[in-house]
Amino acid sequence: KLSRLHSLLLTHAHSEAAGGLDDIRDVLSFIYSPTFTAQCKDPLPTFLSPASLAYISFTLKYIVDASNLVKKDRNAVLPRRVTCLDFNLLGEEKEEKDGEGSKEKEKRSEVKKGRKREMERIFPSGSERYGGFLSFPLHFGSPSSSLPCPSSENTSFGFAFGKQTKVAYISHTTEPPSSLSSLLLSLPQPLDILIINCYYLHTPTSSSNNEQLSLDQVLEVVSEVRPKRVYCVGMSCELEHDTTNNMLKEWVEGVEGVESVQLAHD
């Protein structure tokens, strides 16, 4: 049973990823008054992209407002118990556009400098870059790495963490299997556990439907990366649980170094 959360890693802001943020309040510490107002003692450190923060600033405005209020004043009194998060932004700098005027370039430069200062504040030491992702210290345990995984709308982050057991979690991406395999193979340690999005049974023929990975694509990645254990998440009803798992047990027998590939369950 989990009694405490140390940090929150938000992959992207779609409802399946961010819809449960309201329930985080149940594991946070509050001081209550006789009139049921509340003070949040420890906002939860939360790592996310600027695009995700912008999105939940609209969809979960009351959480962002409460979090910003507590960030400015740790003794701030909230009218009720609300999830409070300590937002830490990860990467995602935009490229300069052709034809930008000097004012636009100057403004963009200042934004980048500000972002760099913010990153240095969040990750004062121990941060390293490995190819396409950033390694950063969490507020507990061993370092974590954010893996930028392009999706149709903006970057969805995957994360790799663990010291004795190396785990990677990728919940949403349109990255081709070859590129995704290269990204995972560039991690400083071989993977023990891969938790990966697997929405379709077979890869859609239409590119407009190719928003998430299929089981065919997942197995292509697994064949290349060879993690010991693989858990598929985010499946559609197209993947019948027991039938697919039985098929995967047979598939694994022919792949050296892979102990199991299974559809995950709660």
Image: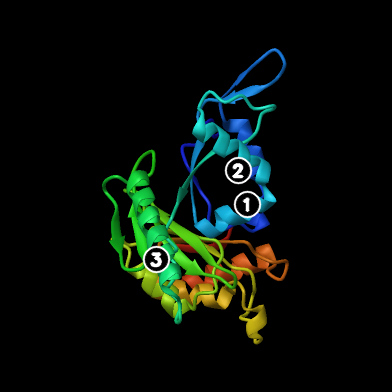
Q: Quadrant of the N terminus?
A: top right
> What amino acid type is highlighted by mark number 1?
Ile
> Which residue occupies the foreground of this view, 221 or 118?
118
| Callout 2 amino acid | Val
Residue at 66% over, 46% down: 61
Residue that mark 2 sits on: 64
Q: Residue at x 56, y 56 (%)?
A: 52
Q: Is residue 80 left or right of residue 140?
A: right
Pointer 3 residue = 106
Looking at the image, is mark 3 or mark 2 earlier in the sequence?
A: 2
Would residue 210 be found to the left or right of residue 72 on screen?
A: right
Is the C-beta separation of discs 3 and 2 under 8 Å?
no
Place of residue 143 in the rendered image (x, y in percent of width and height, measured from the top left): 34, 48
Q: Secondary structure at mark 3?
A: helix
Measured Cα–Cα span from mark 1 to mark 2: 7 Å
The one of 262 and 48 positioned closer to us in this rendering:
48
Task: Specify the label residue 56 is tagged with.
Answer: 1
- Measure how far apart labels 3 and 1 are at the Cα level: 28 Å
